[in-house]
Amino acid sequence: MPPIVYRATDISEIELIRPLWEQLNEHHHARARAFRSHYTQMTFDDRKEHFRKVAANGTLRIELAFDPDTGDLCVGYCVTSLSRDKEGEIESIFVEESFRSHGIGTILVNRALAWLDEHGSVRNRVFVGDGNEEAWEFYRKFGFYPRMTVLEQKRE
């Protein structure tokens, strides 16, 4: 595995994650059970607008992972937010499949959590979509556990 370069940025460079976010959306679509159409209808531009609103009402940070051997191709990202009430959230994370199992996701989350701690977060959370429960094991490494399950009425 080539050395990965990490850096943090803000909403101004959100377009760097578009190709990876689109792969994440496909991943969720493939695994979704009841709300598959949500991922069919969701676009990166929709998500980008959400991130802009989050940034306007608090702070948003984007952790990026680059492979310098491929011309600084972005191979992973983690979008993290901190509300004005000091509640932190891992909004979105994805690592290119061929780069998984090398600790990149762990580094991205550790950097995000350190940033949240530095800025006084009082609670951190992450939402995991239905059908993606395999991610629970990954998040457990950082002290995230299911606290409650939210059921939503399907209106399709």
Image (spheres, rainbow, N blue to C red):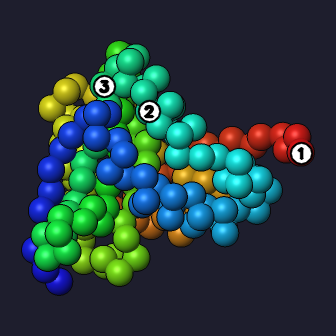
Number of labels in the image equals 3
- Disc nearer the start of the sequence (2/3): 2
Q: Is residue 113 visible?
A: no
Give me the residue at 40% from left, 17% from top.
57
Q: Which mark is residue 156?
A: 1
| Label 2 SS | helix
Name the foreground residue: 72 vs 90. 72
Cα–Cα span, label 1 and label 2: 26 Å
**Which numbered disc, 3 or 1, marks the residue that appears first in the sequence?**
3
Q: Identify whether 127 is placed above or below 52.
A: below
Outermost right residue:
156
Percent position of residue 75, x then y: 29, 66
User: Residue 113 at what x, y percent from top left?
Assistant: 25, 44
Location of residue 9 by image quarter? top left
Q: Nearer the viewer, residue 4 or 73?
A: 73
- Residue receiving disc 2: 51
**x 34%, y 76%: residue:** 100
Which of the two discs, 1 and 2, labels the residue nearer the N terminus? 2
Tell me the quarter of the picture where residue 27 sits.
Answer: bottom right
Q: Give the left or right position of residue 90, taking residue 59 as reference.
A: right
Q: Tell me the number on the disc at residue 59.
A: 3
How would you rate the neighbour count of disc 1 (Cα within 10 Å): few for under 14, some for 14-19, many for 20 or more? few
Q: Secondary structure at mark 1?
A: loop
In the figure, is residue 36 to the left or right of 82?
right
